Image (cartoon, helix red, strand yellow):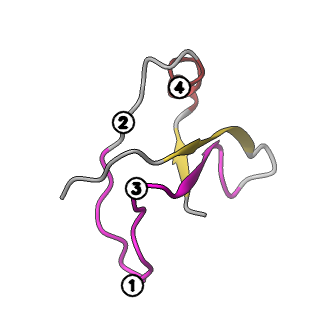
C-alpha cells in the first residue's frame, strides 16, 4: 500500500475531490511504483508527530 505525502495546503482540495492527481518521480530505492487498483494512503506531515491520514483511495491510472 503506497503512501504519498502532501503539503497541508492541498488537504482541503483532496478532501473535496478537487485534487485527484499527483506527479511523482520514480522511486530511487527500487520499490515498485503505484499501479492501477492499488490502495493509496494519502498523508500530510508524514514522518512527523503531526502525521495525519487524509484518506485512502484506489489508484485508477498511472502514466509515465
Q: How far apart are marks 3 and 1 (CA)?
A: 18 Å
Q: Name the residue under label 2.
A: 21
Task: Determine the residue positioned at 74% across, 46% down.
Answer: 51
Q: What SS does tag 4 mark?
A: helix
Where is residue 5 shown, x and y percent of the image? 55, 48
Disc 3 to disc 1: CB gap under 8 Å: no
Image-based side of 48 in relation to 3, left or right: right
The residue positioned farthest toward the bottom in the image shown? 30
Quick one: label 2 or label 1, which is nearer the N terminus?
A: 2
Q: Mark 4 points at which residue?
A: 14
Q: Which of marks 2 and 3 is in front?
A: 3
Q: What SS does tag 3 mark?
A: loop
Magenta range is 23-47
Q: Which of marks 3 and 1 is in front?
A: 3
Quick one: label 3 or label 4, which is nearer the N terminus?
A: 4
Quadrant into which the C terminus falls: bottom left
Amino acid at each position: 500500500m503506497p503512501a504519498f505525502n502532501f503539503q497541508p495546503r492541498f488537504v482541503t482540495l483532496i478532501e473535496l475531490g478537487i485534487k485527484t492527481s499527483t506527479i511523482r518521480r520514480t522511486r530511487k530505492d527500487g520499490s515498485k511504483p503505484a499501479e492501477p487498483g492499488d490502495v493509496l494512503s494519502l498523508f500530510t506531515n508524514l514522518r512527523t508527530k503531526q502525521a495525519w491520514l487524509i484518506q485512502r483511495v484506489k489508484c485508477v491510472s498511472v502514466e509515465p
